[in-house]
């Protein structure tokens, strides 16, 4: 019995030491012209690698693949790749920090020609 309690306590402390998990469904709101669009992320980590996808809601949902995903402690980064009729392939780099129920950070178009990035906050979907 004591060994079982020790194993459970060790596991609980190990989980707390690694912080919150990025795995799961996350949502954020994004301004698009005169409306607000919900963007959903489905993220999964395996070791230091993040995989998943992103979808912008709307009449024509726009999916984007997640590439080059990395997580180290509570810091993460990944690139979303989507297709735009006018611009072709659009690559956006996301970098941030994992919290208990939110992801916060900055996103920037790759090759953004000097543009500043935009802050974001994603909330864990229930």
Image (cartoon, grey):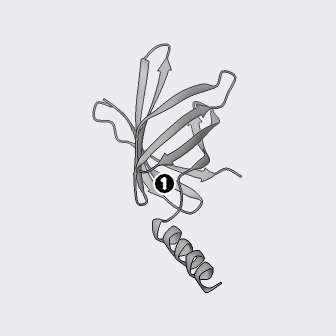
Looking at the image, is 96 positioned above or below residue 54?
below
Q: Most extreme residue toward the bottom, as rendered?
A: 2
* Label 1 Cα neighbours within 10 Å, binned few <14 / some 14-19 / many ≥20: some
Q: Most extreme residue toward the top, as rendered?
A: 85
**Does residue 94 appear in this view?**
no
Place of residue 105 in the rendered image (x, y in percent of width and height, measured from the top left): 44, 51
> Residue at point 42% right, 20% down?
89
Place of residue 102 in the rendered image (x, y in percent of width and height, measured from the top left): 56, 57
Place of residue 27 in the rendered image (x, y in percent of width and height, measured from the top left): 62, 45
Q: Quadrant of the N terminus?
A: bottom right
Looking at the image, is 106 positioned above or below residue 63?
below
The front one of 4 and 75 is: 4
Looking at the image, is 14 positioned above or below residue 59?
below
Task: Look at the numbered disc 1 and give the secondary structure of its residue.
Answer: strand
> Residue at point 57% right, 27% down?
63
The front one of 106 and 36 is: 106
The residue that label 1 is drawn on is 104
**Does residue 6 appear in this view?**
yes
The front one of 10 and 74 is: 10
Locate residue 112 relative to residue 40 in the image: left or right.
left
Looking at the image, is 88 positioned above or below residue 109?
above
> Residue at point 52% right, 68% down?
15
């Amino acid at each position: 019995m004591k060994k079982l309690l020790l194993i459970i306590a060790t596991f609980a402390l190990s989980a707390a030491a690694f912080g919150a998990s990025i795995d799961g469904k996350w949502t954020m709101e994004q301004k698009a012209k005169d409306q607000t669009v919900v963007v959903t992320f489905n993220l999964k980590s395996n070791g230091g690698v993040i995989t998943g996808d992103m979808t912008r809601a709307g009449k024509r949902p726009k999916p984007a693949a997640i590439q080059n995903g990395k997580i180290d402690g509570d810091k993460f980064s990944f690139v979303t790749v989507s297709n735009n009729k006018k611009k072709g392939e659009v690559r956006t780099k996301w970098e941030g920090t994992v919290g208990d129920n939110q992801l916060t950070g900055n996103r920037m178009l790759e090759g953004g020609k000097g543009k500043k990035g935009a802050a974001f906050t994603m909330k864990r979907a229930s």
